[in-house]
Amino acid sequence: MKPPQFESPLQNLLALAADLRSENGCPWDKEQTHKSVIPHLLEEAYEVVDTIEENDDIHFKEELGDLLFQVVFHCQLAEERGAFGFMDVAEGIFQKLVFRHPHVYGESAELKSGNQVLGQWEELKQKEKNLKNPDAKNAKILDGIPKSFPAIIRSEKIQSKVAKQGFDWPNLQGVFEKFKEEIGELEDELHSKNVLDSKKLTYDERVEEELGDLFFLLVNFSRRVSVDPETCLRKANEKFESRFRILEDLVAKEGKTVKDFTLSQLDEFWNEAKSQTKEVKQSR
């Protein structure tokens, strides 16, 4: 079988997806379903994010291509089922975006800020749902938030929705006070079990519940200070990893391993690693 040779790269990609699923196509691709390729879809999306944060345009283009193929492949699977095809998806998102941008393509009042746009977006989104499904008018506020979202993202969506209904602390101080309260409850729970001096505990449902409350509050606080919690935690992970790698290099220069040093000695290496990363950041 020869590869597709249309003038349009998009036509080539669509034809390639069909070839892979054809009788004489790829055995692996022919075995796949929408559900089986979910991990690949998520992986490609996260890899796109990595290249954006690394300002790596070469790999950014490549990863966008990988993500685009995931969309094309799902459309091919759907077309085989007689559900829809790629052009249906493209037309659908085109019409949706035109509808949700009346300040660009319509005669609505000019919007001067991103917040105004977001407010209108939510109103139009609800109007769209009501037109498609009359029963949507009776829907609950938290309906429609995918349960498959990562927990942090779903938490942010939940809290954003209820905040728009006025169910939220009036200011940051209120969140801080609640955070102190929840920290106290977690400490009380651990103190009651006499385990504060323990290095590690076995699973405890009450501890899990109190920790969950703290995570939920952190997401709320992140939203209130306009920080994406997922990005925030990812950057914290990267900062720790970068510093620990330097610590490992410092330890290796001593001809030893991390386990050969006491915690106080490792703290000295850690402080040196922090100093080095700060110097690199300031030099940029």
Image: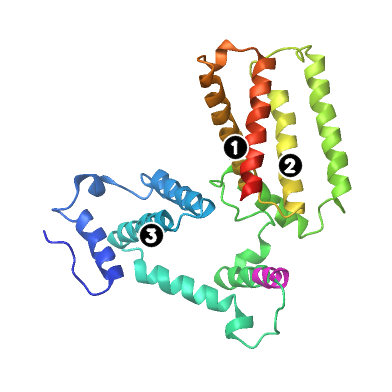
Of the 4 image quadrants, the one containing the N terminus is bottom left
Q: Measure how far apart labels 1 and 2 are at the Cα level.
A: 16 Å
What numbered label is drawn on residue 237?
1
Residue visible at 88% across and 47% down in the picture: 173
Give the residue type at disc 3: Leu
Could you tell whether 7 is left or right of 226 in the image? left
Could you tell whether 246 is left or right of 111 in the image? left
Contact between labelled residues 3 and 2, with CB atoms less than 8 Å apart: no
Residue under pointer 3: 68
Give coordinates of residue 58: x percent, y percent: 40, 57
Name the N-terminal-most of marks 2 and 3: 3
Classify 10 Å Cα crowding around label 3: few (below 14), some (14-19), many (20 and above).
Answer: some
Q: Report the predominant secondary structure element of the magenta stretch.
A: helix
Magenta residues?
114-121
Residue under pointer 2: 218
Q: Secondary structure at mark 2?
A: helix
Residue placed most toward the observer, 240 or 146? 240
Residue placed most toward the observer, 11 or 91? 11
Give the residue type at disc 1: Asn
Residue visible at 28% across and 64% down in the picture: 13
* Residue 165 within the segment the image draws in magenta: no
Q: Secondary structure at mark 3?
A: helix
